[in-house]
Image (spheres, grey):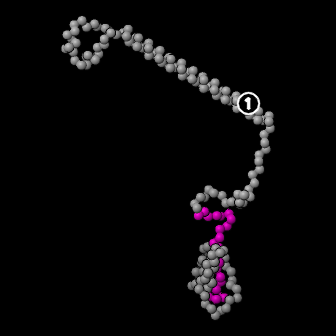
């Protein structure tokens, strides 16, 4: 029964089967040692007749598990930070610097022109709106029907709403 369980365990998982070394047959041992240094589990059963089952728990280099910190996006370092050498990029020539400076200056001046044009458009729009308002008020005054009130006693008989519509000129 025990052997069948061991064989089933071998088939179902990635276990290595090794035959035991010459061990004394008089000792009956239980499953032993969890070797924490190398992260391997080894079991020994019933002296030299039983095969030794060794399960390799170590992760292979291609199949790493999730890091303990949970930061799965971090890469594994191959070197210490102090060992990594970053070479300086090739320095640019004086002509390249001058070209870059002139390009930058041209872009700045173009941006300034665009900004000034935008401000002029906004100013013209504001002036147009102000003129339209002024014209509208003048037209309203022209179209008003003006009835002069000659009898002041009428004002005392008027309601509040009617008094609000009266303008003094």
- Side of 94 relative to 63 (left or right): right
- Side of 55 relative to 169 (left or right): right
Residues 34 and 49: in front is 34
Residue 31, image x, y percentages: 59, 83
> Label 1 neighbourhood size at 10 Å, few (<14), some (14-19), many (20+)?
few
* Rendered position, 149 above or below 161: above
Residue 39, image x, y percentages: 64, 73
In the image, what residue occupies the spot 63% across and 57% down?
Answer: 74
* Rendered position, 76 above or below 50: above
In the image, what residue occupies the spot 60% across and 26% down?
Answer: 115
**One can see residue 105 in this view:** yes
The magenta segment is 46-68
In the image, what residue occupies the spot 78% across and 40% down?
Answer: 92
Read off the residue under disc 1. 102
On the image, which quarter does residue 50 sit in?
bottom right
Of helix, strand and loop, which mostly describes the magenta segment?
A: loop
Q: Quadrant of the C terminus?
A: top left
Q: How many marks?
A: 1
Residue 128, image x, y percentages: 50, 17
In the image, what residue occupies the spot 66% across and 74% down?
Answer: 38
- Side of 84 relative to 134 (left or right): right
Task: Give yes or no for residue 65 being in the magenta stretch.
Answer: yes
**One can see residue 10 in this view:** no
Residue 104, image x, y percentages: 70, 32
Task: Give yes or no for residue 66 being in the magenta stretch.
Answer: yes
* Rendered position, 141 above or below 34: above
On the image, which quarter does residue 64 sit in?
bottom right
Residues 12 and 133: in front is 133
Q: Quadrant of the N terminus?
A: bottom right
**SS category of the residue bearing label 1:** helix
């Amino acid at each position: 029964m025990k052997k069948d369980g061991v064989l089933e365990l071998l088939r179902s998982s990635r276990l290595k089967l090794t035959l035991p070394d010459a061990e004394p047959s008089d000792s009956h041992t239980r499953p032993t040692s969890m070797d924490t240094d190398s992260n391997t589990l080894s079991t020994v059963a019933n002296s030299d007749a039983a095969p030794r089952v060794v399960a390799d728990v170590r992760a292979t280099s291609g199949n790493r598990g999730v890091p303990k910190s949970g930061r799965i996006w971090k890469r594994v370092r191959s070197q210490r930070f102090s060992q990594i050498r970053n070479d300086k990029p090739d320095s640019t020539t004086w002509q390249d610097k001058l070209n870059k400076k002139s390009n930058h200056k041209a872009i700045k001046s173009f941006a300034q022109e665009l900004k000034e044009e935008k401000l002029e458009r906004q100013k013209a729009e504001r002036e147009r709106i102000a003129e339209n308002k002024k014209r509208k008020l003048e037209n309203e005054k022209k179209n008003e029907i003006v009835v002069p009130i000659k009898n002041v006693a009428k004002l005392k008989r008027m309601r509040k709403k009617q008094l609000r519509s009266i303008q003094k000129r």
